[in-house]
Amino acid sequence: SGFGGGGGRSRDIQDSYSSAPRQHLSSVPSLSKTTQPSHQGSPYSRSLNASSQSTQRNEEALVMDDVDDVDDDFDEDSVGESGGALGNAANITRKLMEQGQYMSHNEISGISKLLWREKGQPPLSYRQGFFFRPFGREYPEVRNLSYGLIQLAGGPCGVFAAVQAYILLQLGLADRKDLNQDPSRDEIQDALVNALAEILWNVGSKTSTAFSYHPSRSSSPPPRAAMLAIPNPNGSRSTHVVDLSYDELCNSLRKVEARSEIETRGFVRAAVQEGWLTAPKGWGLVLFMISLILSAGGEAQVREHMDSESKYLLGDHDYCTQDLVNLILTGRATTNTFDGDKELGSDSSSHNAGGGRGQSSLLLKGISSPCKVGFLALNEWYLDIVVGSFFKNPLFPVWVVFSESHFTVFAACDKKSYKRCLAGAWSRPLGINGTDVDTEDRRRFDLIYYDSLAKQSEQILWTIDNDPDGGLTKLVGNDAKKRSEVAKSGMVVRSQRNEMNVQRNVGSVMVGNGKWNYSSQDYVSPLELVIETRWPGCSVNWHGVEKIL
């Protein structure tokens, strides 16, 4: 399933941050002054070909000239921390370098192929870090959007949406509080650190719990651990990680193991303060993705959870696959969104005498347990896939959304909505005359929506309520052909006669014998269809914000 996000990137991004005080990385001991051995002695470095490095650097220079319009005099160090709450991570940084082990050539090659397919190199759109507003002229500071990650180019939206969901958890939802929609720099950086650490620790924990007995090893499961990939550019042509080519980055990588959730947070905090994960032009996204695979036990272990061991974590057009999104959300890179596993060709002839699967059957792997973060998809409204209850009913009211080849996120914004949106499908009672007797509107709730790629200029708030007409699902019915016609036509409008009309033209639509002129608010956003897969029979109030079509 090659789910993923498209979209483009504006070409006049100006790298600038607000002048809010922050600790400069010059206060952290330089890696070049540590007493660690040069990366040139690593196993991976011995396999590099000098001419290939030169060729790659030339190619990167051409591509960067084409799409990276960041000023050359931008001070990467100034965004290494982007806040002052991270504390002094110098001691942790030394510990990282002392404990870290160089990665072998085979290990790096396997991970690179799993991630980047036959290219062996990350797409340019994946060369960025995790950072927030304000960022240049095109990403001005907007009240109630300071929690939002900035994605510079299409492709990695699956990773950004999933990480953003965990950030929202850290901003109040995990504590069943109102969502902190206007966090300070310190609060948002703490949320980033805790979110990335929680994801890596969860992946590492799933690797431990998946352990099974093997005669050649102890029956005791391995200790729970997360792995973090960190760079050590000491000895390269530049001591700045952002200036390294991908080969040089791989050549410098060390992997460090965290044996507790607290230690994981400490290591991630140090990586954030060093700027390894946050520099806008840096390798933060790539380092996090490599860390995911290491925490999962390596390339071979990740492939074991996928439907096909020949799959990759990036699909067509460099989009994130569902496997990659599931790895972040659930800790395992399963391919599907339904509950449990499903077996195709599982008739009696396909099982062996011991009750196992026969050679003719195919095991499709889904979601095995409740999740902290949910997932919804437009594909389900079109009856193409099934999203199971584990994803539809997460432990906390935040969902990653896949719609129109793009991953985004929405979440409850207050304690009242927190409880209501996690409730089951509603059926609000009506009085004798058909009036609504639920005078307190106990089923109505609010959701906030965020798209890391969209350069949002205002907050998008939805109020979800009961639709007395039964919602779009009732209007269309469960006929897959009718729903596919909606998809082919591209636009959906609800007429004044509560009929649904599908059309291509903009401005008017035939209703009965007359012509009805409609506005953009009469269109039905695909996101409304996604919402109905979780809350059938609902209406969505956009509060005057232009709908996303």
Image: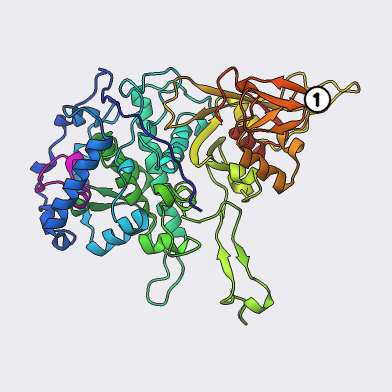
Q: Is residue 517 magenta?
A: no
Q: Looking at the image, can residue 443 be seen?
A: no
Nearest to the observer: residue 73 or residue 103: 73
In the image as oriented, which residue stretches furthest toward the bottom? 353
Question: In percent of the image, x 59 and y 25: which residue is there?
Answer: 462
Colour scheme used in the picture?
rainbow
Residue 124 rendering spot, x and y as whole percentages: 30, 43
Q: Looking at the image, can residue 334 be seen?
A: yes
Quadrant that contains the C terminus: top right
Q: Is residue 454 above or below residue 121?
A: above
Residue 60 rendering spot, x and y as whole percentages: 21, 44
Q: Secondary structure at mark 1?
A: loop
Question: In percent of the image, x 14 and y 62: which residue is there?
Answer: 46
Q: Residues within 10 Å of mark 1 (few under 14, many from 20)?
A: few
The residue identified by callout 1 is 513
Q: Is residue 238 magenta?
A: yes
Residue 530 rendering spot, x and y as whole percentages: 61, 38
Nearest to the observer: residue 66 or residue 117: 66
In the image as oriented, which residue stretches furthest toward the right? 432
Span highlighted in magenta in the image: 231-249
